[in-house]
Every structure is written in structure tokens, then in C-alpha cells.
Amino acid sequence: MWGIGMKMEEIFKLFLSEIEKSVSENVYNLWYSPLKAISLDDDKFTIQVPMIIHKQMLSKTYKDLIDSTLFSITNKHFEMIYLTEEEISKINESSNKDTNKKTKNDDLDIEDDWETNLIPRFTFDNFVVGDSNKLAVVSAHTVAEHPGQVHNPLFLYGKSGIGKTHLMHAIGNYIHDNSDLKVLYVTSDEYIMDYTGIAAVNKGADSINYAKSFKDKYKNVDVLLIDDIQFLVVADKSQQEFFNTFNALFNANKQIVISSDRSPDDLKKLEDRLRSRFMMGLPVDIYPPDFNLRCKIINSKIKNTPLEDKLSQDVIEYIANSCQSDVRHIEGSINRLLAYTAMMVPAKIDLNFAVEALKDYLSTNVYSESSISKIQKAVADYFNITVNDLKSKKKTSNIAKPRHIAIYLSRVETDEGLARIGLEFGGRDHSTISASIEKISNELKTDEKMNNTIKEIKNKL
């Protein structure tokens, strides 16, 4: 028993052995085999889990089983604490900094170890690259390898959930790991809070010290990464201070990386002098991931999970077609599929199983929006070919004609430009896309059959 000196490793080994007897093989492999025991004290048992969804399942669905199994081994009740590897790293990092903290005269506390605010798991190695984000990735690599020398500032913009924040952390982590430069990642909200905090401090020495600490934090860095700059529009005084911060860093050849959900030109409520400075370096638009990239992202996300060997290609394409523009939506779909799989324990995950598992999360009608991917799916189904055929280099008439139609519909049924449409059709250039649109437009003037075909496909959309 625990009372007579059993070690944590022995308890955990017995615990896993008993659990294995109580659940199915698939449930054990999915939720228990990846666990690692971290610490065990008088009343707390800390376990490392691979994903957040494991925390949810273990603390809710399997709570009673875990509590009773541990009690049968130790004759004691424990508070179970489930942490991911990233959370454990942050706790250890924070603990180390607390022991190294020093106070200098009456100034605010200054830590020997600089707080970067970077998330270690966001790196270039696990960022999935495709045609829609290739320029942004190449530019980010260049900045990471030569901070302050090229593309300063680097301005990344695009819709939410397409990887801007991941790329910013990847830049910061690369610089942090390969140099002695001081890196700082913040959101614009955090910047505003830090700046307005000066006014909140009582006047006198404390206020002076806080203001000095603010300037030390933002103007003495070598690399400043500021996320969601669009939220700066609500704070005029913070805009003025950021203008000063920007100039101080830029004039000292310090690297600045900025992200936004829109281009610098579209940030109308920002001061003109700020917008003009954002345009001084390299603004890069990150497009939503196309179909092929979404499939690559799904394969990346399920790697080393119980879904890796169970998901059919149909399921991957179903999720890719249903999650048009947001990687977070893809991640949510995978997490729901993981949870549903744990409950139903199928040998394989086919399309019918996935549709049932995700019916309340994804639209059941893959033609519900007239986006390029849904147009491609509708055209491919109509002509009994695949979406990959439409994106391929095949020039046979049974492929070329549907491709022309899909390109034409992508132009007239969506707001996308020729460049984006070209990306979605295998990286075709502007002139090729334009020629396809013109070809179908001319046929519609004289060909009744073509008119009927377009009408039928539109009805699907």
C-alpha cells in the first residue's frame, strides 16, 4: 500500500495495469498508454497528457474509474492534475525565473531571465506549408535568419485562424534558440494594458518606476513581435506611444514583426504615420489554406494520435471540404472525432462514421457555401471525377472541360480574384485562369447544353 512506501513509478505501473483490465484495448491505447507520471505528493497526483482533449476525457468521462482504481492500490484519494508538456514547461520556466528574480534599488522587479512570451511548440518544423502561405513562410524564415537586416517591419495579414500567430512564434523561437537577441511577443491588447497601466499607478516614485519599466520592456528589445495590431485602433494614446516605440526600434535596426486581420491600407482608423511605417518593410498576405493544404494540415494534426491509422482518405477530404478557411476549425473537428472514437471504438473511421461524429459541428451539406472548394466538389461530383483531377495537369477532354467550368463558376459565384482561383486549381497562372473563364463565357452565348450544365451545378450550390 501507499502507506508502506510504494514509489510513484510502482503505483503508476500498477494503476495502468488495472486500468488495462477494465477498459477495451482501443480505449486504453487512446487515453491511457500515452500518459506519464510527473509527481506524487500527499494528496496530488500530476500526470502528463499529450493533448488537451485527454485532460477533458480523463477528468470527466473516466474520473470515477481513475479515482476508484487509485484508491484500490493506495487506499487514499488523490487530486488528479493533468498537464500537457507545454504547460509543464511553462511551470518549470516560471519556477526557474522566480528563483533568479532580483530587485534593483526601488525599481520594479527585473528578472535575470527575459520573459519572451513565446510558445515553444510553434516552430517552423511543424508549420504546414502550401501555395497559399509559401511567401509568408519564406519571408518569415528570412527574417528569423537575418533579424533587423531585411523585411523590417514584416507585416503578416489575413483572416483569423490561418497561421499568423504560429509563424510569429516560429520566428521568435528560431531567433531565441539561435542567438542571444532579446525577443518579446505580445498582443496589441497586452501592449495597451501595459501602457495604460502607467496612468493607473499612483503618482510619484512608483509611477516613474513603472514608466521606466515599460520603456525598458519595449524599447530595449532586439525583436518585437506584436499580434493583432488592428485592436490598436481603439486606443489613440497607445497608438502615439507605439509610434514612438516603432521608431526607436526601427532606427536602432531592431526587428519588428506585426500581424493583422487586414492589410495596412485597410486599417483606416490607425494614424496615417503608423500605416505608412507598416508599409515600409514587407506586407505579406496569407490566404486561407486551399484544399490540398487543408488535407496536409489534417494529416499533420492526426500524426502520432490514435486517428493516424484509422482515417480514410474520404474522411480527410470531408473535413478539408467542410473547414474552408480556419485551421482552428480543423483542430476542433479532429478533437471531436477523437472523443467520439474513444466512445464508439471503431476499427476503422469511414465517411459515414465521421459524418455522424461531426454532424453537430460541421455542415452536413458540403455544397452549403459557394466557396471555391465547394464549387470544385460540386463540379467533380457532377462529372464523376475527383477534385484532384480538376487540380491536376491532365488535359483530356473529360477533365479539361469540367476544369474550365469549375474555374468559371469560381469567378462568377465567389468574390475571389484570379490569383487566388489559380492557387486553388493547382497553382495555375493568371492567364490560364482568365482563358478558362473566357472560354466558358463564350460557349454560354451559343451552347444551350452548356447553359443547362451550369444551371444544374448552380442549383447544387
Image: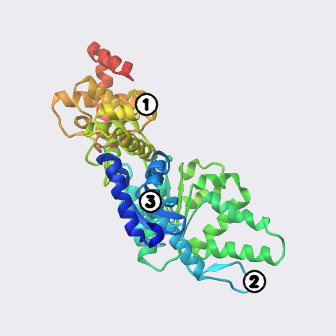
Q: Is residue 113 left or right of residue 48?
A: right
Residue 130 visible in the displayed image: no
Q: Which mark is residue 265?
A: none
Residue labelled with disc 1? 363
Q: Which mark is residue 167?
A: 3
User: In the displayed structure, does residue 197 sit left or right of residue 86?
Assistant: right
Q: Give the alpha-carbon distance from disc 1 to disc 3, as whole Å.
A: 29 Å
Between 270 and 228, the residue placed more toward the observer is 228
Residues marked 1 and 3 touching at CB (< 8 Å): no
Quarter of the image where one finds residue 271: bottom right
10 Å neighbourhood of mark 1: few (<14), some, or many (≥20)? some
Mark 2 is surrounded, within 10 Å at the Cα level, by few (under 14), some (14 to 19) or many (20 or more) other residues, namely few
Q: How is the image coloured?
A: rainbow
Mark 1 secondary-structure assignment: loop
Q: Earlier in the sequence, mark 3 or mark 2?
A: 2
Observer-nearest residue: 399 or 208? 208
Task: Identify the secondary structure beneath mark 3.
Answer: helix
Q: Which callout, 3 or 2, points to the residue nearer the camera?
A: 2
Residue picked out by circle 2: 106
Q: Residue at x 56, y 50 (%)?
A: 265
Look at label 3 and name its amino acid: Leu
Q: Amino acid at mark 1?
A: Ser
Name the N-terminal-most of marks 1 and 2. Answer: 2
Mark 2 residue element: loop
Q: Give the residue at the far left of this rendering.
A: 396
Task: Give the x, y percent position of residue 110.
Answer: 64, 79
